[in-house]
Image (cartoon, coloured by chain):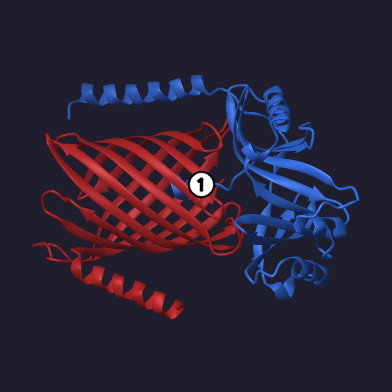
Amino acid sequence: MKSFLILVLLSALSFMASAQNQFGILPVINTTIKLQNEWKINTKLEGRQLLKQHPIPKDENERIFERADLEVVANKALNSAGDLGFGYLLRRQEGKFVHRFIQQYAYTKKLYSSRLSHRFRTDETFEQDEAVQLRLRYRASWEKPLNGLKVDPKEYYLKFNNEYLASLQDSKGNLEIRGLAALGYTINKDNRIETGADYRMEKVFTHLQHKLFLSIGFYHNF
Amino acid sequence: MKLPQFNKIVQCNLSLVALALLLYPNTTQAQEKIEREYAIKATQVPEPALQFISQVFTNPRIKWYAEDSQRGQSIEAKVKRDGTIYSIEFDKTGKLQDIETLIKFKSLSEALREAIEKTLKAEFSRIKIDKVQRQWSGPTKTLQLLLAHKEPEEQYTTRYELIISGTKEKNTSDYEVLVDDMGKLIRTSKIIYGDNPHLIF
């Protein structure tokens, strides 16, 4: 049964890789500093390295380091389940800086043997010579321990994300859909690593693009 | 994008942060419950615990867990029978500690429900009961009879463990509340969940 599931997963990944327009790596370093009164500061440094593109862009190398993001979110835990956050993202892409403001509310529910988070986010993106882009996002994240009823130190877990991003720019709307399947490992209570396949379907209403990334994440709590 | 427009957005975001700080100024200090639970194989379970379960349940699907908590290590069997989930807890030598059964709050007698609600209202300004477990403890043979739906002659203790979302001083958190069979408070522990940045950021 396990061999069959692995075969199905690999076949699906192979199909996705052959059909999409971009393939690359998404390394992420995510750190959290806990403050008083249930406040915390989350900082995320993320890069995007493209390895394959179809079609290959003119006058450009197929393998390029496309972008680097630095995101800082100040988060307040409202209660055991709810979190409210405000943040800022600075992106370096094609020699330009992109600025983004973020507002989010997240609700995490402990289920019998897993955890489910709902994240509602709005963001506003500012870029030179471009109209302001407004986005409304919803993401569901499900964490399932592979040992026991909750994820403890030195245990593996599975994580699945599904996100929908509606955008509005220059009076034109669009949609992006993301899906992530990752395997995680908690090294100890302050450190965890994750790796998995991050699939993105962008510009659904205009020029549909498929993107597949190998996501590699490291999480640390100070 | 023009600079005044950019500055306006920055000011708006800073104002929202300040507003959040004012709205949620404090946290609750409480006894905190931290546990580690992990699956174990039947071969790792002490013999007395295996014997007790095999005498009471014929269900072949029994899940075994080890649990490390503030009170020490314990072994737990989770069994589903006739739609009811039983958690049978043993100490690390296999001696029976207690039996927990997942029940509905509505299934309790009206008098007990009222007593529990009165206890909770004395502790919290707002409550929402998420889960109720009936807890039996006593001599092993007595608990065996209880599981067989027979009324034992020997005395046993019944308690109720409630998982609630409770508000204290405008701060809402999840708590584990233990009450006796008269609804009187025995213990309250604030539940600490694992960190969630990998789920929300």
Q: Is residue B121 above or below residue B62?
A: above
Q: Is residue A197 above or below residue A121?
A: below
The part of the image, by quadrant, that contains residue B169 is top right
Residue A69 image point, x, y percent: 33, 47
Query: Quick one: which residue is furthest to the front in this view?
Result: B150
- As rendered, which of B8 and B33 lies closer to the eye? B33
Task: Chain letter for mark 1, please.
Answer: B
Query: Which lettered chain is shown in blue?
Result: B
Q: Residue at x 40, y 74 (%)?
A: A5
Type of amino acid under label 1: Asn
Q: Residue at x 42, y 62 (%)?
A: A182
The residue labelled by disc 1 is B196
The part of the image, by quadrant, that contains residue A3 is bottom left
Q: Quadrant of the C terminus of chain A?
A: top right
Q: Quadrant of the N terminus of chain A?
A: bottom left
Q: Residue at x 69, y 31 (%)?
A: B110
